[in-house]
Amino acid sequence: MTEHGTKSVGATIVAWTVVLATIFPLLWMAITSIKPQQELFRMPPMFLPENVTLEHYRNLLENTPFLKYFGHSLVIATSTTLLVVVLGVFGAYSLVRFSYPGRERIALVVLSTYLLPSVVLVLPLYLMMVKVGVANTLLSLVIAYTTFSLPYALWLLRAFMASAPEDLEWAALVDGASRLGAFVDVVLPQALPGIISTAVFTFIVGWNEYFYALILVNSDSARPLTTGVMNMLITSFNIEWSLLMAASVMMSLPLIVIFVFLQSHLTRGFAASGVKG
Amino acid sequence: MAGISISKLCKAFGPVMAVKDLDLEIAEGEFVSLLGPSGCGKTTTLRMLAGLDFPTSGTISIAGRVVNDLPPGKRDIAMVFQSYALYPNMTVAENIGYPLRKRGVPRRERLAKVMDVARLLRLEALVDRKPRHLSGGQQQRVALGRALVREPQVFLLDEPLSNLDAKLRAHMRAELIELHRRIGKTMVYVTHDQLEAMTMSDRIAIMQGGMLQQLGTPADVYERPANVFVADFIGTPSMTLLEGTLHQKAGQWEVRIGSLMIPLPREHVAWTGASDALPVTLGVRAEDVCVGETGEPAAVKLVEPTGHENIVLLTLHGLVVTARLGADVRLRPGEAVRVAFRTPKLHVFDRAAGTRLNSDGPPRVAALRGLQSIA
């Protein structure tokens, strides 16, 4: 075998080792969720179940408020994503295309807010939510997640807007488009990979976030999946492993589906913006 | 009438005046090039014509209608950009049809017009491709197609050939000339390439520092440059410019440059603003420098063969003069020669003002006049 061939085989082995190590917890989670209760703690542990059961899923959907929390998370993540994408697209366009005093400084301040640890913001945000009367609601989480997703979105989309040649917009204007028409017809398609990357990033934040949800919401009427699942399945005396694994699988599904469908856009988006996913 | 009238047009970017007091009349169907070096204001002028920049003052009229406050889409113009500005998310057909779509032309009619234009520009086979799958020349034709499809009154072209290689550029230049002849619409063409301007234009507007330096036919600007800038800018190789003083001797004007005395034409020329001992700049085109048996002694400094001719740098009384000689004239650096100028074709400029002094054109057939040394 040539030196190049040996290197290639070595690289493949390393890559597969990394992939398997990364994917193992996910596989273990999925397999555990379909094992009967008596097989969960068998020693030595078995990787594949002897019997397969969907009992935990049925139990989760029928006997717990899982679907309610799922709905809350869906509303929070979707609303945050829409809000961040709309504000981010127009904000980034303004930062790139219009000239006004302090434009560059605004961009820098926006980035610096992204660098702040989120724990610094949680108390002021909580006090503000209480003051305006939205504490303990889905809206409070949408606002909170928007505050730390928007700077990232602005930064990412700004790079995309800047890379769309201005000539394209001028050409559209000469061809009879309005400013908004040129934006929709020409700029948005150029920024699509960035918009998709931003949307996915924001959705993941809204879907997975735990800390703010724990502080800002303490009632079942607005509790998302992350804190809801913890609240109902993990107590000081017991952890419902089988239900927890089934819940985790169902929580991961939307994100996996999104990744599968938008993978190429995401890769392009993050590569073009120089941002690591 | 779909001509263009520009009156006292100014454009300031903060303290910088990009265009100053520009007056320009372009007749219907005329092909006018705005020519000048980078930063001369030609593209700013074109953008103001297109409505992409607003004038600081002055008026722009297209087809007799003042368009200063009209948005680009309402000016009945089309523009071809240097970068072609093809919409990368649209196919060739969608790109060409975009101006029609924005004007609400029904789909069937739109498709028919797009195919007509595609046929005209030999793009029929490419209508379903995206711009990234086209060559530079094809992209250029699509950009032209997008401009042609809605039959505007005026075409604005912003250095549309500058991204093409030399061979394709020459080909597209010929296609553009043919296209203009066929459709007969008013075209304003911005370029920094004098060859493009000279070969394609009915008239050329030469700009520098935001100001119009000269407006004239290609022959005008070459044979009768209005000032030193135009004289220096137009022509390859550049005109040789020599600084001297003007003198009158027995009714005959002459220019003295150091130890060299150059008699100026007596016939056909009116000397506006000439006075004795006036500091002047003398301009000599390379083809008006003759190397032969007569004239002043000079030495060959450098020979640049181009295949069909030789560009020769000569040292004459300590001055460097450029000559254009036939490919068959074999000279070597250091060789001693004799040099004469075609006197009727000399250009004389007031050195302080930079403006041309000989206001009439030289005769087409110029006689050779020898140079003389001042004893």
Image: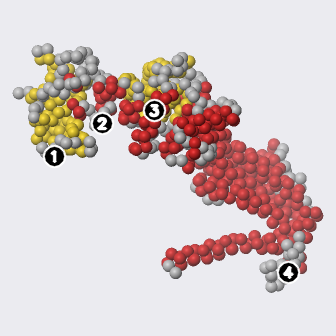
| Residues behind callouts 3 and 1 on a single chain | yes
**Mark 4 and mark 2: Cα distance apart in space:** 89 Å
**Mark 1 and mark 4: Cα distance apart in space:** 97 Å
The mark found on residue A50 in the picture is: 4
Q: What secondary structure is marked by label 4? A: loop
Chain bearing tag 2 is B
Q: What secondary structure is marked by label 1? A: loop
| Residues behind callouts 1 and 2 on a single chain | yes
The residue carrying mark 3 is B178
Mark 2 vs mark 3, foreground winner is: 3
Mark 1 vs mark 4, foreground winner is: 1
Tell me the kind of residue under disc 3.
Glu
- Sooner in the amino-acid sequence: mark 2 or mark 3: 3
Crowdedness near tag 4: few (<14), some (14–19) or many (≥20) residues, C-alpha within 10 Å: few
Chain bearing tag 3 is B
Q: In this rendering, does residue A100 appear at all? A: no
The one of A66 and B344 positioned closer to us in this rendering: B344
Q: Are marks 1 and 2 in contact (CB under 8 Å)?
A: no
The one of B202 and B371 positioned closer to us in this rendering: B202
Say which residue appears at 17% left-offset and 39% top-offset.
B314
Across and down, in percent, residue B165 comes to 42, 45
Say which residue appears at 82% left-offset and 74% top-offset.
A32
